[in-house]
Amino acid sequence: MTPLMVEFGMGSSLRRADYTEAAKRAVQDALWHNSINLAELFGFDKSDMRITLDVGVQRPDLVDAEALRAVFPYGEVTVNLHHGGLDVPRPEGAGNPTVMANVALSVGFDMERADG
């Protein structure tokens, strides 16, 4: 795959400590602020997009990768879960922490190199 662009996003789950929801919001943050027209630019179909999604949260074992793949309307999505993000404790330890997720998504295509 030839990567052509990288986008970043941040999302949170304020009260439920839902790591998947925080990650989904981070993906939406990255996608919804940008118009990704790479397929048309290079003469590919949108289904040819190769998307690598790196997700950082404090509890990657609690993230549903399939739910993240479902956010993308097209393309082949690879999800990599990492320890990262941030859990922000509530004042005086009352209740669940606020969960913050960070994502980086790389978009590319299987392309032939121009130099052979």
Image (cartoon, rainbow, N blue to C red):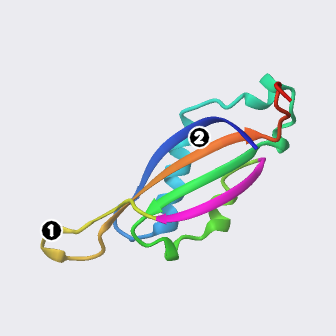
Residue at 84% across / 42% down in the picture?
48
Looking at the image, residue 47 sits to the left or right of residue 80; the answer is right
Residue type of the residue flagged with mark 1: Pro
Q: Residues within 10 Å of mark 2 (few under 14, many from 20)?
A: some
Picture quadrant of residue 39:
top right
* Residue at 51% over, 76% down: 61
Name the residue at 58% across, 31% down.
Answer: 34
Which secondary structure type mostly characterizes the magenta part of the structure? strand
| Residue receiving disc 1 | 91
| SS label for mark 1 | helix
Return the x and y of residue 107 as percentages of the image width and height.
68, 41
Q: Is residue 96 left or right of residue 50?
A: left
The quarter holding residue 4 reads top right
Mark 1, Cα crowd under 10 Å, few <14 / some 14-19 / many 20+, is few
Q: On residue 31, which mark appears?
A: 2
Looking at the rendering, the stretch of residues picked out in magenta corresponds to 74-82
